[in-house]
Amino acid sequence: MPAYNAERTLAAVYRKIPSGIVDKVILTDDGSSDQTVTVAKKLGIETIVHDKNLGYGGNQKTCYMEALKLGVDYIIMLHPDGQYDGTDLPLFVDALLKGQSDLVLGSRFLGKQHKTPFYKAISIQFLTKLFNLVLRTDLTEVNTGYRGFSRKFLETVPFSANGNGYIFDPQIIIQAVYFGFRMQEVPVTKDYFKEASSPNFSQSVRHGIENIQLLIQYLLHRSGIKKADFLIG
């Protein structure tokens, strides 16, 4: 659980995780200014604390590296801000245990409820079509923050070379394609509300531009014109 100022939502998210579905829960706090760490420790969650804010991607890096140290076979990222529903976790577990996918993506567009603002839904669908065109994939959502990974995936792709911001997530998808890993989507619920952390309109525009630049980097790398650091480590 990569956390930042999730004091108000953490307990509710944690309690919705089905009993016995995971072996361990880890939370990495990205320099929160509220009582996220205190709440996590009261809930008995193993907590790692950043002295300063590293960013959304930087927080994920710590999450995955700490989880890998435990020798686990599968890792699932669940945001503690309440945007995603812990009751959807069994879908990820089932998909990973079947061994048919190394990266499992939760999609809000696969028939489950979502309260996505109109401008976000349009931009996400546009970027998804663009990614599918360039990567030759058939995804319904590339901007999902609900993801499951096999150990092999995280030990192979150079995720530590990814950006520390929101660009981390699309880089993971490109890495999956580049390194030949199997991807699968599962339907999830997505919610937006005051306490949930989400890019605003200007941040969304900037992130969209970064995604397009990222695809250009991928194409340049594939063609041998210019190497992309996140594909070579």
Image: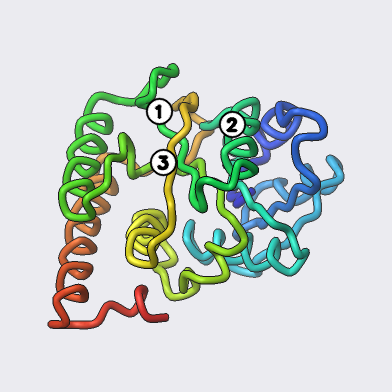
Name the element at disc 1. Answer: loop
Give 118 or 95, whichever is nearer the viewer: 95
Give how far across and how far down residue 107 sits, in percent: 41, 33
3 or 2: mark nearer the eye: 2
Q: Earlier in the sequence, mark 3 or mark 2?
A: 2
Determine which quarter of the picture holds residue 61.
Answer: bottom right
User: Which amino acid is tagged 2?
Assistant: Leu
Determine which quarter of the picture holds residue 163.
Answer: bottom left
In the displayed structure, does residue 132 sit left or right of residue 154? left
User: Which amino acid is tagged 3?
Assistant: Thr
Are the residues tagged 1 and 3 within 8 Å (C-beta)?
Answer: yes
Q: Which residue is mark 3?
A: 144
Q: Earlier in the sequence, mark 1 or mark 2?
A: 2
Mark 2, other Cα within 10 Å: few <14 / some 14–19 / many ≥20 = some
Q: Which residue is mark 1?
A: 108
Residue 193 can be seen in this image: no
Residue 213 can be seen in this image: yes
Give how far across and how far down residue 94 sits, in percent: 63, 35
1 or 2: mark nearer the eye: 2
Q: Name the residue located 71 percent from the left edge and 26 percent from the top edge.
A: 16
Q: Name the residue located 48 percent from the left edge and 40 percent from the top edge.
A: 197
Give how far across and how far down residue 211 sits, in percent: 24, 56
In the displayed structure, does residue 17 sit left or right of residue 168? right
User: Which amino acid is tagged 1?
Assistant: Arg
Name the element at disc 3. Answer: loop
Q: What's the distance in space between the residues labelled 1 and 2, CA to CA?
A: 13 Å
Residue 169 — which label? none
Give how far across and how far down residue 39 sits, in percent: 78, 42
Q: What's the distance in space between the residues labelled 1 and 3, CA to CA?
A: 8 Å
Q: Which residue is mark 2?
A: 91
Mark 3, other Cα within 10 Å: few <14 / some 14–19 / many ≥20 = some
User: In which quadrant will I find the C terminus?
Assistant: bottom left
